[in-house]
Amino acid sequence: MSVTDLRKVFEVPVREAGLAASIKSLVHREHRDVVAVEDVTFSIAPGEIVGFLGPNGAGKTTTLKMLSGLLHPSDGTARVLGHEPWKRERDYLRRMTLLMGNRNQLQWDLPALDSFELTRAIYRLPEAMFTAQRDELIELLELGPLVNKPVRNLSLGERMKAEIANSLLHRPEILFLDEPTLGLDVTMQRRIRAFLADYNRRYGASIMLTTHYMADVEALCERVIVIHHGSLLFDGPLSVLSQQFAGHKTLVVTLDEPADLSNYGEVIESSATRTTLRIARDQTASVTARLLSELPVRDLTVEDPPIDDVIELAFASVKPA
């Protein structure tokens, strides 16, 4: 997948509140341009799993819609599996999938099994392949008791599991996943992550994942792309993201006896003998050496800050226009 200077601008109507403004808009409607995606460039190798991160309104979903062919860009180019996505060629559509956690793709009043059959017909899947894939997904996602119920009777988490199964029945080569674990409990989130990792290994599929659950990113993605206000903010290894935007590390120190550690760094949390310190990244080695030589240390761990905190620091580093 190769994306170059991708841009999307929406023209939205504007008017003031009130009856007079409503009448005026019937005759002369005013518009303004809203830039959703601004000159975004990146590439994703076959078989790569990439986290696509950003706050609400950053342009993540708009980008995925362009790459899956639902939206035509205002400018820029993209090639996915050798195709220009917005041309919506049949060969491209049968090799990719777009799963959006806040959108329903299943038939609302029908059981999920009927929607699965519809998917089989749309993609013209061989019966044996379809049955094997369907049964495997039903077992993995614990859908057995649910697939015969109308979709409208399922909870959000149950519906999301059925949506995931439906999106993968045709074994796509590239997956655009927008909040795929939305509404799932912690156990099922882990199960979905394990399945996606296994799917990636077995079929060599590329996965582009947007999520607000940082556990999904840490478990699946070695590389992340971060966008903010529609523009690319970071593209690289997850470990480098922490180095670039978080200038500190966390030291968790357990002592044999209580002591005040405030002269070693910023105390974040403290109990009788256990203290959590925030230390400047470039001072980690020297502070660790001092602690070990000056105090009766029973245990000491050095950690990067949680990825959630790093992402927030990255967003905070962007000055408002």
Image (cartoon, rainbow, N blue to C red):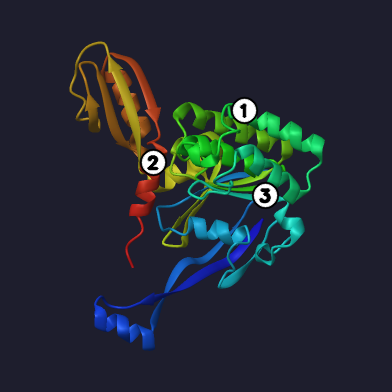
SS at mark 2 in the image: helix
- Residue drawn at point x = 45 percent, y = 70 percent: 35
Q: Amino acid at mark 2?
A: Asp
- Looking at the rendering, in which quadrant would you find the C terminus? bottom left
Residue 314: image location, x then y, percent: 39, 51
Name the amino acid, label 1.
Leu
Q: Secondary structure at mark 1?
A: helix
Report helix, strand or loop for mark 3.
loop
| Foreground pick, 271 / 288 | 271
Residue underneath mark 2: 308
2 or 1: tag closer to the N-terminus: 1
Image spot of residue 310 (x, y percent): 39, 43
Q: Residue furthest bottom?
A: 27
Q: Circle 2: is it few (<14), some (14-19), or many (20+) Cα within 10 Å? A: few
Query: The residue under label 3 is which amino acid type?
Result: Ala
Q: Residues within 10 Å of mark 1 (few under 14, many from 20)?
A: some
N-term-proximal mark, 3 vs 2: 3
**Left/right of residue 202 with respect to residue 308 in the rendered view:** right
Residue positioned 41% across, 62% down in the render? 229
Q: Is residue 274 left or right of residue 201?
A: left
- Tell me where residue 4 sits by quadrant: bottom right
Q: Position of residue 183 (x, y in %)?
A: 45, 38
Name the residue carrying label 3.
45
User: At 50% from the left edge and 32% from the top edge, which residue is drawn?
Assistant: 189
- Mark 2 vs mark 1, foreground winner is 1
Of residue 166 and residue 117, the one placed in the foreground of this image is 117
Rendered location of residue 148, percent (x, y): 60, 33
Q: Which residue is mark 1?
A: 140
Q: CA distance from mark 3 to mark 2?
A: 26 Å
CA–CA distance in space, label 2 to label 1: 29 Å
